[in-house]
Image (cartoon, rainbow, N blue to C red):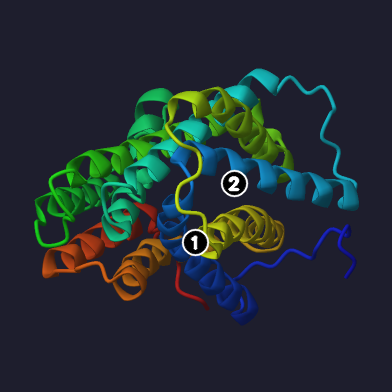
Amino acid sequence: MSVGEIPERRDTIDFAAAAIMIFLTVSWGLNGVAAKFANIGFSPVFLSMARSAIGALIVFAWCRYRGVRLFERDGTLPAGILAGLLFSSEFLLVFIGLQYTTVARSTLLLNAMPFWVLVGAHFLLGERMTLQKWIGLALAFAGVVVVFSDKLSSPGPQALAGDVMALLAGVFWAATTLAIRGTKLANVGSEKLLLYQLVVATVTAIPLLSVAGPVFRDITWVPIAAVLFQAVYVVAFTYIVWFWLLRRYPAAGLSSFAFLTPAFGVLFGGVLLGEPLGQRMYLALGLIVCGIIVVNRRIRRPPV
């Protein structure tokens, strides 16, 4: 099948899709580790700008290759700028917060995002909460509380600041999702939607460089490779693969694999960075993942 050809739709998740999704969630779980390494050589504001700028150039080149139209007037510019500002705020908080807290704690708090979407959709989009969703929300909130209560995994007294930033980053992530769902962006192609966020994040980071301290820190091949991993691989490659899967397979089935991302983030934080992982962190992981599953679980008829 050629790149520009519309892929055949599938009704179920097959082995190939499952394998690709596991591969993607492993990659996304590594993203926090890469950000931690990148912070060694560059300021968080510069990281946000560089990651977004390089990613935007690659996605734009991909769109030109595939003939994706990006500059048609469709009335989405104001909403696109809003989504970009929210996206930019999210990653600035993530990068700055990782200077103070661990990857495991940051990943768990950031991935509480679905529950902020749930609450926001209830009040802003008229999507009413059910008892099942309230139960899931309670489980996830309990997981967040456990993260904050775990002293063993805390790297120091400044960890609280990083934890709060990660939690707020999840709120901004949820706000981005709500802005997309509640505006004309809901009907925009995935590539254009991603470019709105990447371009605005690049532009808004530029004036902040002068007040964010030294741009360059300890420059070695490790932070450079970490930046390129995030920009070229995570932002451009994995997102494009994700969009391709969304065009071919059921979105609900694919999204269920996203539950693996915080699990891999916690695992890699412990294995690659030597972060202490006490029993409370595993309990928090279990509560948050169970909460997400409960919220998204649908009652289905058994196959005939």
Which residue is at 44% across, 31% downward? Answer: 175
Left or right of 244? Residue 43 is left
Left or right of 208? Residue 276 is left
Query: Can the viewer see residue 300 in this picture?
Result: no
Count the labels in the image: 2
Find residue 300 and report its horizontal and vertical position in percent: 44, 64
In terms of image quadrants, where is residue 120? top left
Find residue 65 and report its horizontal and vertical position in percent: 89, 52
Find residue 105 and report its horizontal and vertical position in percent: 26, 55
Residue in the foreground of this view, choosing between 272 and 140: 272
What's under tag 2, amino acid-wise? Answer: Arg
In terms of image quadrants, where is residue 162? top left
In terms of image quadrants, where is residue 168? top left
Residue 107 image label: none
Pick whichever of labels 2 and 1 is earlier in the sequence: 1
Residue in the foreground of this view, choosing between 242 and 108: 108
Q: Is residue 62 above or below residue 48?
A: below
Left or right of 276? Residue 166 is right
Q: Which quadrant of the rendered structure holds the N terminus?
A: bottom right
Identify residue for label 1.
28
What's under tag 1, amino acid-wise? Answer: Trp
Residue in the foreground of this view, choosing between 55 and 114: 55
Which residue is at 39% across, 43% downward? Answer: 94
Which residue is at 36% across, 34% downward? Answer: 128
Assign a secondary structure to mark 2. Answer: helix
Which residue is at 58% across, 38% downward? Answer: 49
Q: Is residue 215 above or below residue 296?
A: above
Identify residue for label 2.
51
